[in-house]
Amino acid sequence: MSAIRFEQVSLKFPGAPRPAVDQCSCEIETGRLVVILGPSGCGKTTLLKMVNRLYEPTSGTIYLDDADIRRAKVTKLRQQIGYVIQQSGLFPHMTVAQNIAVVPKLLGWSRPTIQARIDELLMLIKLPPEEYRNRYPAQLSGGQQQRVGLARALAGNPNVLLMDEPFGAIDAITRTSLQDEILRLQRQLQKTILFVSHDVEEALRLADRILILRDGKIVQYDTPFHILTQPANPFVYDLMGADDMVRQLSLLRVETAMISAPDNYRHNGEPTVTRSDSLRHALSLILKTGAQTLTVLDNGATVGVLTLEHIRDSASVGASA
């Protein structure tokens, strides 16, 4: 089932020479993290902001859970959708707890329920409630502010999150930490996430699917693995750096190249990797141990197998694309 569906969606701003978004059609499956990627001015943020109706399309239709979003009241629609922006967007005169409570209050939750939700979310983003609940945004680091911004977006328990370059203003080390946090939370919560980024490495690291825009048009929408190994055109090939095989292996997760474990598969002491490990780490483990097969685990359970041939195939297809 698709959580979000775009059907021939276009938006042309008054006086602009061409549409910012031009006849875009695609389906975002429930529970997927989709990164919208492309150069500056390609329409990434415009496409994102049409989902919560900060912009209205000139033509076409956007569906949320098969319902035309134009048929919903804007306020009700936005209460169903979490929204995270680059500078966190926290209200500076409110404490952390008050910021997180904004949407639950609008939804009419009881005070005890709101307080419990605040503490639950602060624990989820690893900011102990007793230490951070009553702090103000100015008393937080940039990374901590972004974590609180994420908690606020999750507060009403929306099924859909929109994230507009949320880590763009954060230093590289903190950005990597926050990316790890998003992956951890996504494995736990399984939200449908639209994530705007201009950073190819961030897209490859986070995405279940990547949607590439150029001049307002969708040029490719696929898994990171297929986009790297089967780029739609030279623009995508150059954008993704598809000729750099070592970089590919560093950024692609094991789950992009593994095969599902057969029903009769038994783990017989083979080295193990997790589905979120990089293919480069997996290759290093194979070369170090001489193992023919790696067992892929998820929360301790066997979910797949990975061989040198699988990794070689991913690299060789990318080289020939």
Image (cartoon, rainbow, N blue to C red):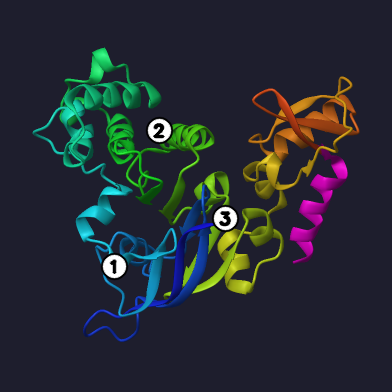
The structure residue drawn at horizontal position 63% and vertical position 66%, both measured from the top left corner, is 237
Q: What element carries label 3?
A: strand
First along the sequence among labels 3 and 1: 1
In this orientation, does residue 243 appear?
Answer: no
The structure residue drawn at horizontal position 31% and vertical position 75%, both measured from the top left corner, is 57
Q: Real-space Cα distance between discs 3 and 1?
A: 28 Å
Q: Real-space Cα distance between discs 2 and 1?
A: 40 Å
Is 229 located above or below residue 93 in the figure? Answer: below
- Which label sits in the foreground, 3 or 2? 3
Region rendered in magenta:
306-321
Amino acid type for the residue under numbered disc 2: Thr
Provide the residue designation for mark 2.
174
The structure residue drawn at horizontal position 49% and vertical position 38%, both measured from the top left corner, is 186
Are discs 2 and 1 less than 8 Å apart at CB? Answer: no
Provide the residue designation for mark 1.
71
Give residue 282's mark: none
Residue 48 percent location from the top left of the image = 36, 61
Provide the residue designation for mark 3.
209
